[in-house]
Every structure is written in structure tokens, then in C-alpha cells.
Image (cartoon, helix red, strand yellow):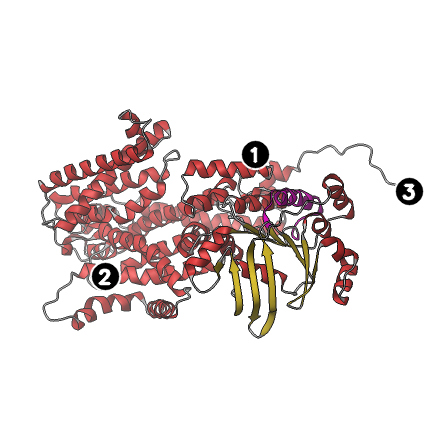
């Protein structure tokens, strides 16, 4: 006998626990006597912890005082934030000359302006903007921070950086308004829209060359005072070291990972040896090698700035870690993708650059950002070899006469700063993952 | 393919007229290949003429996939000569890259690029290998998408398409490079029965345009309609080859008879 359902079952409302807060609380927190007791105990523990922190850190805290003794007078068991506030400039900029601080701030603002288009939805050519950030911004910022005389190489790079910055910004504004790009807008402005592609390209090159010459001549006219790297410090120094590390770790890691997977034995062995060597040694050892041992091997009179040595060490170290992340990502790509790319005639670099890497890097975002966060935190190690990065600065507060012995508050402040930066990075990586996922949505 | 829709195609089209010319486009001469110590291809001799359509069949592990993968050098053969379109396949990377632009290939697992839209999948080759302007490449891509009957999917990602649609995109992607030869490596084996027909239809139409095709497949109905020659391989040998009518009617070799009795 056939069983036939004649009427369609109509959908019913979901049970209470799925659609109201009361239902959720009942299901998840108070489902049984034991769970209710556990919930209440946990809430009590959270309450006393938060209350203690609140009273110490905000309720009884001292915000304005001249020294630690005064802090104690006002409140014996509250936090003494006054010390941190008095040292804020030092924490952020180290001993950078106070009248030159605008240079550091300007550098930060320029970076923001440079990278902002990457977050704007309608802007085109984001890869180009990203690449110029990595390859040109460091020259501009480097000169801004260090100052002094410019040699011809620096002059060219600075001019290129300024042009790119201006071009990117105008391009992004045009993109936000019309959804077009800067070259298109220029051509339309000159009324050459109907000319051939080649003429248009030549006009654009002409404009580019002209503006380069103008900027080059203009930048000859100004220079900024030298600020020795020994005066750099605080959060600024931490961000410089980790920023250069982050910007160079990924390209370096990609090159090393490709080297390690290369079919050419010499390249493969060299890359593998390099990666394994750096990965098997603690960062602190690499830093000591770079700053104290390395100069011993160099010819007499060869003096390299310690900061540069540290940055190079950090870059190499992190490139090796990154290489292993990238390699893991490469291994996750099925062989069929290589074959698919080969059959449409793409060679090695085309296959890697257009097909394999974009997919591999997408898989690797969580690991890559994790590695960046680790890098940011690891840079505090440079305080051990005598650079006054943020950790060094925070610790020297307790050695400053008025604030002698003030340990807790600066370190907690530092922890909050780090948390803020790292959490933002982690959130952004999550956002990127969601935005870039194309293969799973059905 | 079910017996029913195999019949359907035959009914509508009848057998295609041969488009083979006398010009040789692929020539394999005493080709041998080993995977490690395992001998997969044994002294393979094969000559394919321009416009000829060949179906390769045989039990799994018989070396049929390996054979066609050697033709565009996805696999490297160790002995013998392979000449494709007048160019000998050897260690010269330039030659290999050149041959790959002339030989399209469609895989069992599609191998579309999941991070690119359908249109970007199709324009990748024309833009980066043929160096065509983007607009022109997109026109070509749309032309072939229309030919495989899914122009409306151009802006989707491969993950959003059904298997049959993905395979048709893969065929269109190869065609965008304007190849002289198309290789199909079990193009319908990973598909649901109702999707097999839509892919086979596209392949039959392609055969109708006079494309040189080598198809590894178990779709004997397709072989009957399209093939100029059916090749049966077993354990690395070409055991038997014949035109399809004779091949299915009077298989000569015992192994062929056994194979056909299992799949028909």
C-alpha cells in the first residue's frame, strides 16, 4: 500500500529558547540546579574582580600629582596614573626632540592617508596602492624621522613617494565620487578621450614625468634637521621596528617559501638551510648576534647603525617564520590548480602570482596576522640590547626620581596599548577573511 | 550516461561526419613512461590527424589519462618522441609553454580557479598569455560562455555553480585560448547523471566545429556519435583501435570483449 501525504506540513514557530533572551538565559545558564549554582558563583567571582579593579584603577586612582609621594598622600591604595600621564610623551616618542615631534606625527598621518584608500569600497587599483605603501612610504617616512642630508637616491625615492601619495589620494577621491580612476579622469579632463590608447598612454607618461621633475626640484629646496636614532624611542620606535618587520616579512617569506619548494636543488637547499637556521635560534640570540657579534666580523672602522642592524635581524627572523606559514598555505592548494593554470599556458611566475599565491595567502590570513601580532610583541626584546622602545620607556619611569618605584601602572598602561593594537589587527584579519572568502559561499 | 539519453543524442544528431584531414597534428613514437619502477605507458605509437576525434577507453589504471597528460607535458615521458603541431616535446620550457597554449585540456575535477569569477577565469589566459586587451578578452570570454549556454553566470564564483556548469565553464576557459587541440580527461566522471548530458551536448557541438579532440571517457554513446576512432588501452598498451561501429560490433581482442561486456 502506498503512503501518500496529502497536506503539506506548515512551518511552526521555533521553541522559546531559540527566539527570546529569557529563553536563552534559561537554556544556557539556569537549565538545572547545579548549573544555576555555578552561574551564580561565576557571576560573584566576576563581580568582586571587576569591583576591585574599578576601585583601584578608577575609583581611588590619582590622576594629577607631581610625584609618587603626593600620590600616596591623596590615596594610599589607588593607582597613580599621574606618573604615566607625566611620561606620556616619553612613552610615545622616547627622547625624540620635543620641537621635532611634528615630524613623527606627520609620518603617522601620511601613512594613514596613504593606506586609507585600501579600506574604501569604490577605489580601484588597491594592489598598486598597497605596493607603493610597502616600497615607497618607508623612504619618505625614514627621511622624515631621521632627517639630515639627502643623497641622490633618497631624493629620487622621496620624489617618487610624494608623487605616489598625491596620485593615490586624488585617485581615491575620484574613485569615491565617480567610481573611476585617476588616469581616466586626466584623459577626460584634457579632452583626449577619443584618441588611441597609445597616445593616451604617452600623455599620461608625460604628465607623470613632468610632475616628477617638478616635485624633484621642489624637494631640493627643503630638508629637515638630523635626529640621531639614539633619540628614537617609545611606541614610535616599537612601531618603526615592527612596521618594517611586518612590511618586509611577507615578501621575504614568499620568496623563501618559493625557494624552499623550488625544483632547483641549490636554491632549495639554501632556502631550507636559511629558514631552519633562523627558526632554530631564539630572537634574542639573533639580536645579540646582530648588534655585538656582527661588528666583530666586519673590517675595522665599519660602523653600522645599531637600529639598522636590529631591524635587519628582525626582518630576517620573521621572514623565516613567514616562509613556513606561506609554505603551509602553498601545500594546501590542490595539484589541479597548478595543472589548470598550466593548461591555459601560464608559466611558473604567472601560475604562482595569479593563481596559487592569492589562494594560499587567503588561507593563511589567520596565521599571517598571528605572526604579525607575535612580531609586534617580540620587538619589545630590543629593550634588552639597549634600545628604548616602549617597554624600555615604561620601565624607566620607575627609575625617574619623582616616580621612583612606580612599576605597576606603566606596565598596565603598556599592556592596554598592546591589547588595543593587537586586538584591532586580529579583528581586521577576521574581517578580511570574511570579505575574501569566495569559494565556500553557495 | 543512461541508455535513454544516449539514445536521445543519437536520435537528434545521428553520427557526425568526419572532419579529419591528412595533416598530422600529434605524433607519438615509441613513448614509454614509468612512475618510479611501474611501467605505465609501453611503446605507445599514435598518430592523430588534424580534425580527428579520438575516444580513449579502458579499465582504470590502464594509462589512458597518463597518455593524454603526456601530450601537453603535465606528465613527463622518459623514452620516445612526442611531436605536437610540429614541435617536439623536450626539456625546453619555451616549447612546453608554447604547446600548452595550443592544447586545451579539461579535467575530471574541473580545476577552475575558486578565487576568481567565471569571467576572470576565462579571461586569465587571453590577458596574461595572449596579451590581449581586457575588453577584447572579455568579449571572447562572453562569446564562449554563450556557446556553452551559461552567459548569465559570468559574475559568479565557481563555488556557486553546479558541477555540470563548472565543467562547461572549464571547456569555455580552454576554448578562450583558441587551441588547435582539445584534450578531455574523463570530463563527466565526477558529475551527476542529469548533468552529464549538458556537458556531452557541449562536447558534441564542439566536435561539430571540426576541433581535434582526444577524449578519455566511459561514455560509449558519446563515442559512437562523435569518434572517428576508438582506442582501447589496457596495462599501458594500445590493445585495439578501430572506427566506432566496428569497435563496438566486432571487438577483436579478448580483453576488449571483456571490457565492453562489463560496461555496455
The residues colored magenta run: B189-212
Question: What residue is shown with label 2?
Answer: A310
Of residue A9 and residue A93, the one placed in the foreground of this image is A9
In front: A211, or A331?
A211
User: Which of the chains bears the disc numbered 2?
Assistant: A
- Give the x, y percent position of residue A74: 23, 45
Q: For marks 3 and 1, give the CA distance.
A: 46 Å
| Alpha carbon distance from label 1 to label 2 | 55 Å
The answer to whether A388 is drawn above or below residue A89 in the figure is below
Q: Quadrant of the C terminus of chain B?
A: bottom right
Whether discs 1 and 2 lie on one chain: the answer is no
Element type at marker 1?
A: helix
Q: CA distance from mark 2 to mark 3?
A: 83 Å
Where residue B204 sits, quadrant-wise, is: top right
Disc 3 is placed on an element classified as: loop
Residue marked by disc 1: B152
Q: Position of residue A246 (x, y in %)?
A: 31, 53
Residue B109 in sight: yes
- Is A174 situated left or right of B134 in this image? left
Q: Is residue B155 visible?
A: no
Query: Residue A1 has which mark?
Result: 3
* In the displayed structure image, the side of residue A223 where residue B245 appears, left or right: right
Please provide percent x and percent y for residue A84: 23, 48
The picture places residue A257, in percent across and down from the top left corner, at 39, 61
Amino acid at each position: 500500500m502506498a503512503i501518500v501525504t496529502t497536506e503539506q506540513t506548515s512551518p511552526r514557530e521555533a521553541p522559546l529558547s531559540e527566539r527570546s533572551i529569557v529563553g536563552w538565559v534559561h537554556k544556557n545558564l539556569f537549565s538545572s540546579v547545579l548549573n544555576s549554582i555555578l552561574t551564580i558563583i561565576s557571576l560573584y567571582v566576576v563581580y568582586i574582580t571587576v569591583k576591585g579593579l574599578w576601585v583601584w584603577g578608577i575609583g581611588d586612582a590619582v590622576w594629577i600629582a607631581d610625584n609618587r609621594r603626593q600620590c600616596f598622600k591623596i590615596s594610599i591604595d589607588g593607582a597613580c596614573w599621574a606618573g604615566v600621564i607625566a611620561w606620556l610623551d616619553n612613552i610615545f616618542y622616547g627622547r625624540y626632540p620635543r620641537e621635532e615631534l611634528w615630524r613623527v606625527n606627520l609620518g603617522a598621518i601620511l601613512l594613514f592617508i596613504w593606506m586609507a584608500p585600501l579600506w574604501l569600497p569604490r577605489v580601484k587599483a588597491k594592489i598598486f596602492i598597497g605596493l607603493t605603501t610597502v616600497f615607497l612610504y618607508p623612504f619618505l617616512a625614514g627621511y622624515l624621522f631621521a632627517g639630515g642630508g639627502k643623497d641622490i637616491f633618497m631624493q629620487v625615492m622621496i620624489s617618487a613617494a610624494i608623487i605616489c601619495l598625491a596620485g593615490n589620494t586624488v585617485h581615491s577621491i575620484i574613485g569615491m565620487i565617480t567610481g573611476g580612476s585617476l588616469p581616466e579622469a586626466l584623459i577626460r579632463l584634457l579632452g583626449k578621450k577619443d584618441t588611441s590608447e597609445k597616445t593616451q598612454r604617452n600623455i599620461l607618461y608625460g604628465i607623470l614625468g613632468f610632475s616628477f621633475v617638478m616635485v624633484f626640484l621642489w624637494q631640493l629646496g627643503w630638508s629637515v634637521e638630523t635626529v640621531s636614532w639614539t633619540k628614537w624611542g617609545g611606541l614610535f620606535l616599537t612601531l618603526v621596528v615592527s612596521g618594517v618587520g611586518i612590511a618586509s616579512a611577507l615578501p621575504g617569506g614568499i620568496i623563501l617559501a618559493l625557494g624552499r619548494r623550488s625544483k632547483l636543488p641549490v636554491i632549495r637547499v639554501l632556502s631550507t638551510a636559511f629558514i631552519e637556521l633562523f627558526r632554530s635560534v631564539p630572537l634574542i640570540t639573533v639580536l645579540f648576534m646582530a648588534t655585538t657579534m656582527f661588528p666583530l666580523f666586519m673590517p675595522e672602522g665599519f660602523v653600522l647603525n645599531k637600529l639598522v642592524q636590529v631591524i635587519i635581524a628582525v626582518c630576517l627572523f620573521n621572514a623565516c617564520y613567514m616562509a613556513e606559514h606561506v609554505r603551509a598555505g602553498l601545500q594546501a592548494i590542490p595539484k589541479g590548480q597548478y595543472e589548470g593554470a598550466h593548461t591555459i599556458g601560464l608559466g611558473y611566475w604567472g601560475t604562482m602570482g595569479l593563481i596559487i599565491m592569492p589562494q594560499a595567502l587567503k588561507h593563511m590570513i589567520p596565521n599571517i596576522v598571528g605572526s604579525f601580532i607575535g612580531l609586534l610583541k617580540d620587538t619589545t626584546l630590543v629593550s634588552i640590547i639597549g634600545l628604548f622602545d616602549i617597554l624600555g620607556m615604561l620601565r624607566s619611569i620607575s627609575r625617574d626620581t619623582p616616580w621612583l618605584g612606580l612599576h605597576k601602572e606603566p606596565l598596565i598602561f603598556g599592556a592596554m596599548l598592546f591589547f588595543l593594537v593587537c586586538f584591532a589587527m586580529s579583528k581586521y584579519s577576521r574581517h578580511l577573511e570574511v570579505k575574501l572568502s569566495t569559494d565556500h559561499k553557495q | 550516461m543512461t541508455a535513454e539519453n544516449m539514445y536521445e543524442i543519437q536520435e537528434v544528431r545521428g553520427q557526425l561526419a568526419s572532419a579529419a584531414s591528412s595533416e598530422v597534428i600529434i605524433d607519438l613514437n615509441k613513448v614509454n613512461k614509468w612512475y618510479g619502477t611501474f611501467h605505465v605507458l609501453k611503446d605507445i605509437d599514435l598518430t592523430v590527424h588534424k580534425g580527428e576525434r579520438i575516444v580513449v577507453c579502458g579499465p582504470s589504471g590502464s594509462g589512458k589519462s597518463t597518455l593524454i597528460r603526456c601530450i601537453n607535458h603535465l606528465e613527463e615521458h622518459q623514452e620516445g618522441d612526442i611531436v605536437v603541431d610540429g614541435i617536439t616535446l623536450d626539456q625546453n620550457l619555451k616549447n612546453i609553454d608554447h604547446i600548452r597554449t595550443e592544447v586545451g585540456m579539461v579535467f575530471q575535477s574541473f580545476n577552475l580557479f575558486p578565487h576568481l569569477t567565471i569571467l576572470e577565469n576565462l579571461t586569465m589566459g587571453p590577458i596574461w598569455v595572449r596579451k590581449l586587451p581586457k575588453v577584447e578578452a572579455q568579449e571572447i570570454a562572453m562569446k564562449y560562455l554563450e556557446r556553452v549556454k551559461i552567459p548569465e553566470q559570468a559574475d559568479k564564483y565557481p563555488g556557486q555553480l553546479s558541477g555540470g556548469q563548472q565543467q562547461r565553464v572549464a571547456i569555455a576557459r580552454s576554448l578562450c585560448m583558441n587551441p588547435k587541440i582539445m584534450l578531455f580527461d574523463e570530463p563527466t566522471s565526477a558529475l551527476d547523471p542529469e548533468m552529464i548530458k549538458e556537458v556531452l551536448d557541449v562536447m558534441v557541438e564542439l566536435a561539430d566545429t571540426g576541433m581535434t579532440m582526444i577524449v578519455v571517457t566511459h561514455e560509449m554513446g558519446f563515442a559512437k556519435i562523435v569518434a572517428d576512432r576508438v582506442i582501447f588501452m589496457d596495462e599501458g598498451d594500445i590493445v585495439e583501435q578501430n572506427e566506432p561501429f566496428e569497435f563496438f560490433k566486432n571487438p577483436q581482442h579478448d580483453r576488449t570483449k571483456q571490457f565492453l561486456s562489463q560496461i555496455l
